[in-house]
Image (tube, rainbow, N blue to C red):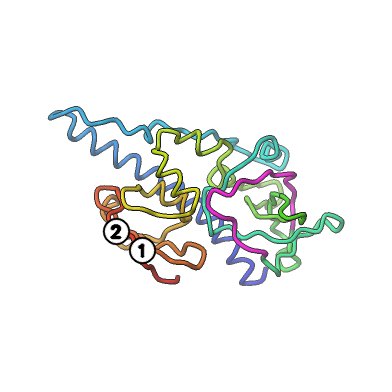
Amino acid sequence: MRAELKQWIQFGLAAAILVAGAHTAYIFYQRYQSARTAANSPPPLNPDYYVTPKKLYPYDLKSAQQLTRQPVWVKVGYSIAYFPYDRAKKRAGFAHPAGLLLPMEKLQIQDVVLGSSPDAPGVRQVLALFEKDGQTYAFSVGSATGDDYRILSDDMLFIQDPHELYKHWPADVWEAIDRHQMKPGMNELQAALALGLGIPDKSTDPLNRSVNYPNGGNPLMVTYREGRAVDVGPGSAP
């Protein structure tokens, strides 16, 4: 597989794992903080703790077809490359990426198929197909080696409208997210849905750190204190 193509695919799949892990770590850290202070005063409940997005747990090509039964929304914006797909030849144009999926982009998956590159005959990509502006595109949601499948769509896509999952968020926060904007007071989960994947600094404190968001070529640096954005300014290109 060409180095550039391999990098596109691996980055997208690694980003899905990173975002899912960061979200989980954030929730557990918040729960720990709440439990630690519970003896002194009852902490306010954060409704985010109790949001559990549905998962499909696909384990092969047939079970991955569940992705076609409802719209999906992108969790990991600006990190998943998509490619032109020729339905007649049943082939993805891996050599020519068409772009990156946007944060919260809504898609209707039409099919899930296997695709391969001449440079990697032993590894097949699990490809989700969708249409955009009359053209069919594909992006990888996993890989298959023989009968061994590794499908990460649950970490890459919501199968429920995030507006409904997080309907407790204020209207002004959702307005910023829908416009792909960041404002002080938003948390990292809200920032991820607005700006896509962020690259945190080396701080070991997940609630007090700075995160650089490439943001589709318009990088922003966001500083968080106690899990909320206190400063939003220009970032740096990765």
Q: Give the number of the disc on residue 98.
A: none
Q: Are marks 1 and 2 in contact (CB under 8 Å)?
A: yes
Q: Let me know if residue 113 is in the magenta part.
A: yes
Name the image quarter holding the C terminus.
Answer: bottom left
The span from disc 1 to disc 2 (Cα, nearest Å) is 8 Å
Lateral position of residue 46 relative to residue 122, left or right? left
Q: Nearer the viewer, residue 69 or 151?
A: 69
Q: In terms of sequence position, does the residue under pointer 1 or pointer 2 come before the other?
A: 1
Which residue sits at x=40%, y=54%? 182
- Identify the residue at horizontal 61%, vertical 71% (top origin): 4
Left or right of residue 34, residue 138 in this image: right
- Is 152 left, or right, of 44 in this rendering? right
Answer above or below: position of 159 versus 231: above
Labelled disc at residue 221: 1
Q: Which residue is pictured at 42% across the width and 39% down the height?
A: 171
Label 2 sits on residue: 231
Instruction: Specify the amino acid type for callout 2.
Output: Asp
The local crowd at label 1, few if under 14, some if 14 to 19, many if 20 or more residues have their Cα within 10 Å, is many
- Callout 1, which amino acid? Met
User: Considering only vertical position in the picture, is 221 above or below 131?
Assistant: below
Q: Does dot 1 land on a helix, a strand or a loop?
A: strand
How packed mark 2 is, by other alpha carbons closer than 10 Å (few <14, some 14-19, many 20 or more), is some
